Amino acid sequence: MSFASVSYPSDPAKRYALLLEQASALMAGIDHPISNMANVAALLYQALDDINWCGFYLMDRGALMLGPFCGLPACIRIPLERGVCGAAARLDAVQRVFDVHAFPGHIACDSASNSEIVIPIHHGEKVIGVLDIDSPTIGRFSETDQKSLESLVRLIESSCDFRKTGYTLA
């Protein structure tokens, strides 16, 4: 499969519809989560305006460990008691943070980040990781972003065999 740079629609709903279509096509018949998450991180980084980091963290021995991403080097291990990613995994709840500097325990991996959205990823009933996206703009992420990214994560969950990650899922 060949992939070229795409001009994404300015309308957020249409942009996410195209992004979901692309992600679905890329993951068709591929169940390896690392490969799929790498492609999804690249798609998000290309498709979304005004972001400076996007990627995945996966559970490993009670903490989140860095997975595929696009952006500057990132924190490798995040305890569940710290940061926006830790809160999303610990609480099994989306964290859409308007201003990360007001979030107790925020971890500043990239000092340019000012807002963040984190979506939990499940294997069965367990949280096994998160999708994390940062922006240099305060209040960057909307309800449309959240709902669309939740749909993208559901696609990842249904497409991937997370036993292939090498991470401990317990």
Image: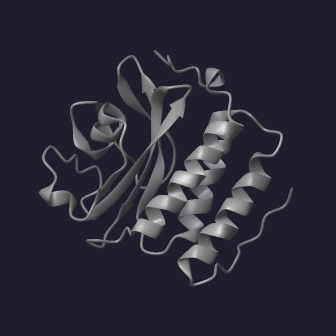
**In the figure, 170 relative to 105: above or below?**
above
Tell me the quarter of the image containing the C terminus. Answer: top left
Tell me the quarter of the image containing the N terminus. Answer: bottom right
Residue 105 locus on image (x, y percent):
15, 43
Residue 154 locus on image (x, y percent):
59, 45
Q: Residue at x 84, y 61 (%)?
A: 2
Q: Residue at x 44, y 26 (%)?
A: 59
Q: Residue furthest bottom?
A: 10
Q: Residue furthest right?
A: 1
Q: Is residue 111 left or right of residue 56?
A: left
- Can residue 87 be seen in the rendering of this structure? yes
**In the figure, 146 relative to 86: above or below?**
below
Residue 4 locus on image (x, y percent):
77, 70
**In the figure, 102 relative to 16: above or below?**
above
- Can residue 113 be seen in the rendering of this structure? no
Q: Is residue 45 left or right of residue 25?
A: left
Using the rendered view, name the quadrant where residue 111 is placed.
bottom left
Residue 145 locus on image (x, y percent):
46, 65
Using the rendered view, name the quadrant where residue 62 is placed.
top left
Q: Residue at x 58, y 68 (%)?
A: 46
